[in-house]
Every structure is written in structure tokens, then in C-alpha cells.
Image (tube, rainbow, N blue to C red):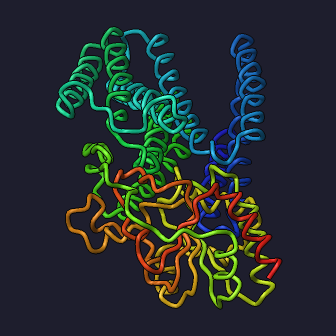
Amino acid sequence: MTELAYLAAGVLFIVGLKGLTSPTTARRGNRLAALGMLLAVIVVVVDLIVDDVAAAWAVVIAGLIVGGAIGFILATRVQMTDMPQLVAAFNGFGGGASALVASAAIVAAGSGVATETAVVTVLSLVIGAVTLSGSFVAFGKLQGIIAGRPISPPGGTATNGVIAALTVIAGIAAVATGEDVWYWVAGGLALVLGVSAVMPIGGADMPVVISLLNSLSGVAAAMAGFVIGNQALIVGGALVGAAGFILTVEMSVAMNRSLANILFSGFGGAPVSDDIGTKPVKRATADDAAIALAYADKVAVVPGYGLAVAQAQHAVKDLASALEERGIDVYYAIHPVAGRMPGHMNVLLAEADVPYDQLYDLDQANPQLTQTDVVLVLGANDVINPSAKDDPDSPIYGMPILDVDEATTTIVVKRSLSPGFAGIDNPLFYEDGTLMYFADAKQALEETLSAVERL
């Protein structure tokens, strides 16, 4: 019955993951996967009752109460702007849990461990430790506790290479000798490697890093499953590892950069040019934006991190509804790496009940933009920068972008002309067809809505 229950949990994981491939089935898929995890937890608890391990039973109950309470509080109180940080923290806790499982197995087993068990124990410990420390560095960068710019260790990537090599050597020594000390050396080096590997990565690349760390947390969990012989943990970890890595590769493709370039280039670390924001632009008011939008036939909204910071998802939905009442076609053009985590903008807009069929991805949006009268950009920057298409010297050259410059008029809502995470100027802001509306996104949308209603 235990094996069958684990099989059922694994099936629920797979069906749930399949459900996440479409916005219309994502909520149901998430619930099915959660049901599978609940089933797996119940089976573990029942096993403890059968084995009559009183001490372990007490620990599990305490873990369920404390962990469940923390998870409930975080899930209900976290703001959408802080969701990327929460995901990074979850990745870290997942990696830390796997490392603790491996540590417990090392302490309990002593020196008489089979080679295959020693290998997966080292992998669970090392990958889990890297994920733990790396994820909390990512959390710090996203939260603003740590500077978002790339911070390289002394010696740069060579230092990280040395630490990684020493970690591998310590892991091999642990497997070969069976001595506990080598396990702890490998784990300690892995913690250092997680910090030194993520610190040199700029804030613009954090969505990819979060996705990769998510994948690593799954691999660490799968290895921990092999350590303790838990099939559900193996299946669940393998699914997370594979799905996370596929997403990481897809996001790298969306940025037209290799994963190695993202991890080792220190992108965004160049000093910001002094002449950014000094050129003349066409400033817009709420009335200007309202006139352009109200008399358009087709309007595109491009959400960015500024929308999330301002908590303006409901305000943009209200404005879009007012435009639709006038017979205007409104859709949302979403770049794959907009925001601070994969799917950030999709989740944000879903919270405001924006219809799924109005959300266009990059490939769907670009053909439409050439036929669009007005594009309303809310806090996006690098993902609409035409330098990616026509400036070979630009660090983002070749990155697929949303072609908002192909539309008749572009209204860009930003607080200032400051550059995005790439640290480069955006020529779009100075074009004849661009209006710059300098304001908080929520304030700008509310003022524009009021102006539209007065027309």
C-alpha cells in the first residue's frame, strides 16, 4: 500500500505539472500537485505510526505545525512585488532540507556505507548546500539587502572554479574513504560556492538564476530520495529538476544568451553612462495619454516591474475595461523575462482577473504591434529597447524584444529616465512617436482613467 500510495502521489505530481502548461488549468494543476504532496506526507506519517517511532513521530508533528503555519502566513501575506523573493526563499529551504536529510544519513550510517549510497549522499549534500546559500543571495539581491549589481569575488570566475574543484575533490574523498570529515568539508565548500557563484550575477538575470536554483533544489531532493529510499521524493525531485532546467534554457533563449554567459559574464556590471536621461523627450500628461488611448482602435499594454512595484494591476484592468467599453481592442504583450521571476507579469495580471486570452507572449504580440495604434508601457525598459535590434555594440544586441517601436504611438510610464538593469540608455524614449509620462504607474493609470471618463 505504501508503494501504491507513492505511485499515486507521483502521478498527481505529473498531472499537476501538466496542468501548469496552460493558464486556464494552472490552478487545478497546482491543487492536484498539492494533493499529491499531502498524500506523500500522510504515507510517511502512517509509516512512522506503524514503526512506533515515538521520537520521530513527535518531530514530524512539530514540523507539520510549524512549517504549515509559516507557509500559510507567507502565502497569504506576501505582496506580489515580493513573490520572486518568496520563490527564491522556497528554493533555498528546499535545498537546505535535502542537505539536512543527507547530513542525518551521514551521522546515522557511520563508515559502513555502500558506494552508490555514498555518491547520492554527497550529491544531495553538495547540491542542496549550493542551492541553500545561492538562493538566499538571490533573495538578498531581489530584496535590496545586497546590491543588485554583479559583485565578483577576488580572482573572479577563477576563484569559483577553484572552489568548485575543491568541492568535487572533497566529495570524491568522502565516497572513497567513508570519513565523515570529508562530507562536512564538501558541504562547507558548497555553501561558499553558492554565495560566490550568485554574487557576480546582476539583478537583470535573477529570473534565470531563480529558475536554475529551482531546478537544483529538485535535483537535490531526488538525490535525498535515493538516500532514504523514498520514491515520491525521487519522482517529485526529478520533475522539479527537469522542469526547472527546461524553463532556464527557454529563458536563456528568450534573452538570446547562453546559460554560461548569464552565469559568468557579470552582465549589467558596467558603469552607467553620464549622458543617460539628458536628451530631450516629449512629456505627456494624463490628458495627453487619455486622448491617445480613447481615440485608438487597438491598444497594447506592456507590463514591467514598475507595474508590480506600484501594485497597479487592478488600475490597469480598470483602464482597459473603460477602453473596451468604447469598443477599443485591448491586449497585453508580455516578454518572457519581464519582472523578477518567470511568469511574474502573468500572475500579477491574473490577480486582477485579466482574461487569459488577452495575454500575448512575445511571438504572438510582435505581429500585432505593427497594427497597434497605441502601446502603453508600464515600467518595462530593457525588453522594449530597440538597441537589441539595430546596435551591434549594445550588450543586449540580439535579444528578442517587444517591437513597440513599430506601433503608431508609444506611451512610456516611468518615474524617470533612469536605465533598466542592463544599465544602458533606451533610444525609444527619444523617438518622435514616443510620449514619456513620468509618474508612479498606479497614479498615472488612475489619472488617465479619470481623464478618459471626462472625454
**Location of residue 270 in the rendering, given as x and y in whole percent from the top left corner:** 27, 45
Q: Position of residue 151 (x, y in %)?
A: 32, 32
* In this picture, residue 439 sits left or right of residue 57: left
Is residue 28 among what the camera can see? no
Count of number-bearing discs: 0
Q: Quadrant of residue 233?
A: top right
Q: Residue at x 26, y 51 (%)?
A: 261
Instruction: Give the side of residue 316 with respect to residue 376, left or right.
Output: right
In the rendered image, the quadrant that contains the N terminus is: top right
Whether residue 7 is visible, yes or no, is: yes
In percent of the image, x 29 and y 43: which residue is there?
271
Q: Is residue 2 above or below residue 309?
A: above
Q: Out of 110 and 30, give the one closest to the viewer.
A: 30
* Residue 389 x %, y %: 30, 73
Position above or below: 149 against 303: above
Q: Indicate the quadrant where residue 301 lies.
A: bottom right
Question: What residue is at 73 percent from the left and 75 percent from the top?
Answer: 320
Image spot of residue 303 (x, y percent): 58, 64
